[in-house]
Amino acid sequence: MRIDDALAWANGELQASSSSDLDAKVLLCHVLDKPTSFLFAWPEHELDDTQKNTFIDYVKQRAKGKPVAYITGVRDFWTLTLKTSPVTLIPRPDTEVLVEQALLCASTFKSKTLDICDLGTGTGAIALALASELPTSHVLGVDFVADAVELATQNATLNRINNASFRQSNWFDSVGDAKFNLIVSNPPYVETNSPYLQQGDLRFEPDSALTSGEDGLEDIRNIIHLAPSFLVDAGALLFEHGFEQGQAVRNLFVQRGFSEVKTVQDYSGLDRVTLGYWKI
């Protein structure tokens, strides 16, 4: 089977998916351990039997709906390559907006040595992206799931990041009396009965990392209530949230006493990140 034949076959198998062409290329690049440019430069390249059988298996898994990131076990995020696992959410491009906003907040501090906390760190994507951009700061990532903490630690090693550490904790429960300049979180924010849970990749991702009560705001509400005890003066709290939750999250910030509260849109122009400062 040649590369061009393999891609044509895969597109036929994945025809129900709007991303079939991209999925096929990502899977084949992973099997060949080659960049996308190789597929275009060498369409006549023959797959050996092992590569062919592995690619067929991967495509059949994807045809059943399994996310590409769970099939390959990796996902690129920011400038990093991260291991993935079904125990955590798959890092998504829109979450990079949260990283961008956190870096803007970081730039407002005179000190170059900041303490940052990432709540519900999962793969460690947010924590590690911030740590890579702020090498003189320290980032603590916490997660309730022990396997997620182990995965994030592996991703720190994989990306040679030494200024991030990870700890098992139910939000702030195991943080002690630490104080942070920035607290960031991509918490569960999907409504428990949301129809989106039965669509696409969400069918395979852990509900515990997705849902948060009837309105999807249970965890955000809890974090906003607790966060001031763990922020320095003029410290910032930032969330990723659902595209219809911007106003509700802003209201929660204001009611708790945060200032300079604002919502930032993602790359599709939808509300995605809301932030506020404590005692500025």
Image (spheres, grey):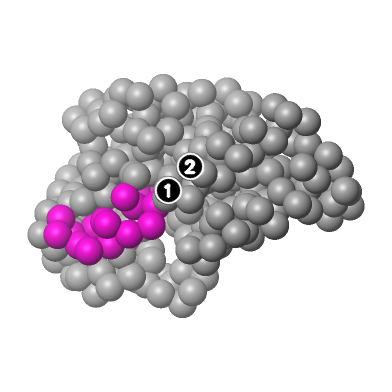
- Left or right: 196 in relation to 68: left
Which amino acid, by three-letter code, is at mark 2?
A: Gln
Looking at this view, is 201 or 97 the one in front? 201
The single residue placed furthest to the bottom in the displayed view is: 269
Labelled disc at residue 33: none
Q: CA distance from mark 1 to mark 2?
A: 5 Å
189 in the magenta segment: yes
Task: Give the residue displayed 46% in from the left and 77% down from the top.
Answer: 269
From what the image shows, is residue 259 above or below residue 54? below
Picture coordinates of residue 160, whole percent (x, y) = 63, 26
Disc 1 is placed on an element classified as: loop
Mark 2 surroundings within 10 Å by alpha-carbon count, few (fewer than 14), some (14 through 19), many (20 or more): some
Looking at this view, is 154 or 106 the one in front? 154
Mark 1 surroundings within 10 Å by alpha-carbon count, few (fewer than 14), some (14 through 19), many (20 or more): few
Residue at mark 1? 64
- Left or right: 159 in relation to 207: right
Which amino acid, by three-letter code, is at mark 1?
A: Lys
Looking at this view, is 239 or 104 the one in front? 239
Residue at mark 2? 61
Picture coordinates of residue 222, whole percent (x, y) = 15, 49
From what the image shows, is residue 210 above or below residue 21? above
Residue segment shown in magenta: 181-203
Residue 109 visible within the image: no
Please tell me in which quadrant of the rendered image residue 245 appears: bottom left
From what the image shows, is residue 93 above or below residue 45? below
- Left or right: 156 in relation to 166: right
Task: Give the residue displayed 38% in from the left and 43% down from the top.
Answer: 89
Picture coordinates of residue 205, whole percent (x, y) = 34, 44
Residue 202 visible within the image: yes
Circles 1 and 2: CB atoms closer than 8 Å:
yes
Please tell me in which quadrant of the rendered image residue 217 appears: bottom left
Looking at this view, is 219 or 85 the one in front? 85
